[in-house]
Amino acid sequence: MLNDEHIELRKSVEEFAREVVAPVIGDYYERCEFPYDIVRKMGAMGLFGLPIPEEYGGMGGDYFALCLALEELARVDSSVAITLEAAVSLGAMPILRFGTDAQRQRWLPKMAAGEILGAFGLTEPGGGSDVPGGMRTTAVLDGGEWVINGSKAFITNSGTDITGVVAVAAITGRREDGRPEISTILVPSGTPGFTVSKKYSKVGWSASDTRELAFTDCRVPEENLLGERGRGYAQFLRTLDEGRVAIAALSVGLAQGCVDESLRYVRERRAFGHEIGHYQAIQFKIADMEARVHTARLAYYHAAERMLAGLPFKKEAAIAKLVSSNAAMDNARDATQIFGGYGFMNEFPVGRFYRDAKILEIGEGTSEVQRMLIARELGLPA
């Protein structure tokens, strides 16, 4: 059950999404333009600080509050939702979880206010799901500074005008068994040797920022190490477990948006003498869509509940992410079919939903990776 604060938050974000985001986001999407004005207003609402303690400028809420906000935003648009998700769960949370107090004081207040965005530099052009095996980025200590060389791919929020820092995973040595020692280093935007490419031309999430990053003899102070040396991969695994719950919430929002738009449309569109909602074929399709949303929402609620209670939640997060991303993709396809030719037009939200849904089965761990995690948690061989 949601408490009173969660209910009030969900209501306020729903109103914001409907009244502020919905009327303008289509134009941003068509222009592939980052919605700075919307982000500024989200910052003023405190959305970027939802799970950040008050001592660091946040709202002092919990991670579930962030998930509720993501769901309501994604009912209208996923570009705005993923900007918030990446900024908080991938940008701010690693600093909150693993950073020193000095690092938290430096970065979190501005992140919580939405004045700057953080990014999560893990994926590499040749890596994909095989993070340790595919990592080529290195960092070497030299005279009290980390010297970073390498590149990252598909990094959200990494090249906006308000991006402040990127947490970069890099190989900082080799263990006795030959495996890479991976550490996380904070690299402020504008650091010499840190180059941000032009924006990708993407199928969806067109109003969000996604870029490739390059590091060429990029130097940052030794104290920019985030957490313990050699613990970078473990840190990011924890971050990804939490992030999967957030992506599940975003996916549920998109799936719910497909139901919302379809219900509106079938009461307006007439064919063969009736509103098309009169026909059982349409009714059954929408009933299936609603069932998917309901099931997926319960899955991410359960994962979030275990996470907040301090219980193991890796399996539940993987289930939530798998079920929710499938629901988003299936509902987007069905909504597009209900809308017919209009569903193929970008002026209708379901056109955006269809374009945005597929990445949810890929980002923060593919569906295949989620199945692998679930199988391992059930005790099946790795």
Image (spheres, grey):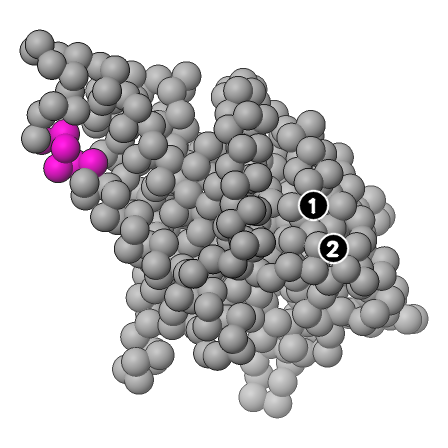
- Res 194 visible: no
In the structure shown, which secondary structural element does the residue marked by tag 2 occupy?
loop
Q: Quadrant of the C terminus?
A: bottom left
In-front residue for pair 24/154:
24
- Res 350 visible: yes
Q: Position of residue 235 (x, y in %)?
A: 61, 72
- Residue 282 covered by magenta stretch: yes
Prevalent SS, magenta region: helix
- Name the residue that disc number 2 marks: 58
Residue at image point 52% right, 41% down: 11
Q: Position of residue 150 (x, y in %)?
A: 67, 56
Which residue, as the protein is rendered here, is positioned at the far bottom?
176
Which residue, as the protein is rendered here, is positioned at the far top?
273
Whole-angstrom CA distance, mark 1 to mark 2, is 7 Å
Q: Are marks 1 and 2 in contact (CB under 8 Å)?
A: yes
Q: Position of residue 92 (x, y in %)?
A: 69, 57
Asked where in the image residue 190 lies, by quadrant, the reply is top right
Type of amino acid under label 1: Gly
Residue at image point 53% right, 78% down: 310
In the structure shown, which secondary structural element does the residue marked by tag 1 occupy?
loop
Q: Which residues are magenta?
A: 281-286
In the displayed structure image, the side of residue 101 where residue 177 appears, left or right: left
**Is 256 situated above or below 239?**
above
- Name the residue that disc number 1 marks: 46
For residue 56, the mark is none
Residue at image point 56% right, 39% down: 13
Residue at image point 67% right, 64% down: 94
